Amino acid sequence: MFTVDPAASTPVYEQLVECVLRDVSSGELMVGDRIPPVRALASELGLSAGTVAKAYREMETRGVIETRGRKGTFIAQGRDDRDAAAARAAARYLDEVAGQLHYSPEECVALVQHALRARSEG
């Protein structure tokens, strides 16, 4: 279901989060779909349960998944929710960079573009 590369520079838990987000974006995973329990996925991927649990906590914080007790863990986020989460993150970024650090709008955009280039270059 999910794949990660332990040799990559991106931490494995982040790769797992990105994998789920990508599958949600592509429609491969839909709201309400169940994802494997932490221990099962850790075993399947050859990872520690702690690493997978960290990814699940991150996704739960972002509103991507929800845990329903003994029933399991499910995809909780539709596209609208994802856009809203991105808008909140952008607002937090602007509060800090433009508000607290006094960067201009143009400088804020340049910082984001630089970060995206650096991320794509690995």
Image (tube, grey):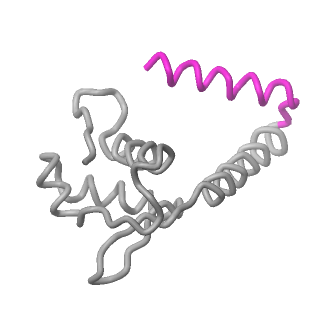
Residue 91 percent location from the top left of the image: 76, 50
Using the image as rendered, state which of residue 101 and residue 59 is in the foreground.
Answer: 59
Using the image as rendered, state which of residue 104 and residue 49 is in the foreground.
Answer: 49
Q: Main secondary structure of the magenta part?
A: helix
Which residue is drawn at the image coordinates 38% and 43% (left, top)?
A: 19
Q: Which residue is most to the bottom?
A: 70
Q: Quadrant of the C terminus?
A: top left
Using the image as rendered, state which of residue 88 and residue 35 is in the foreground.
Answer: 35
- Which segment is the magenta one? 102-122
**Left or right relative to 86: residue 11:** left
Which residue is drawn at the image coordinates 16% and 46% (left, top)?
A: 45
Residue 94 percent location from the top left of the image: 78, 43
Q: Indicate whether 41 appears above or below 15.
A: below
**Left or right relative to 82: residue 49:** left
Whether 115 is among the magenta residues is yes
Residue 30 percent location from the top left of the image: 45, 59
Q: Indicate whether 114 appears above or below 62.
A: above
Q: Indicate whether 71 appears above or below 15.
A: below
Whether 2 is among the magenta residues is no
Using the image as rendered, state which of residue 27 and residue 118 is in the foreground.
Answer: 27
Which residue is drawn at the image coordinates 40% and 62% (left, top)?
A: 57
**Left or right relative to 57: residue 12:** left
**Left or right relative to 20: residue 95:** right
Quarter of the image where one finds residue 107: top right
Total numbered circles? 0
Which residue is drawn at the image coordinates 53% and 62% (left, top)?
A: 77
Q: Which residue is most to the top?
A: 121
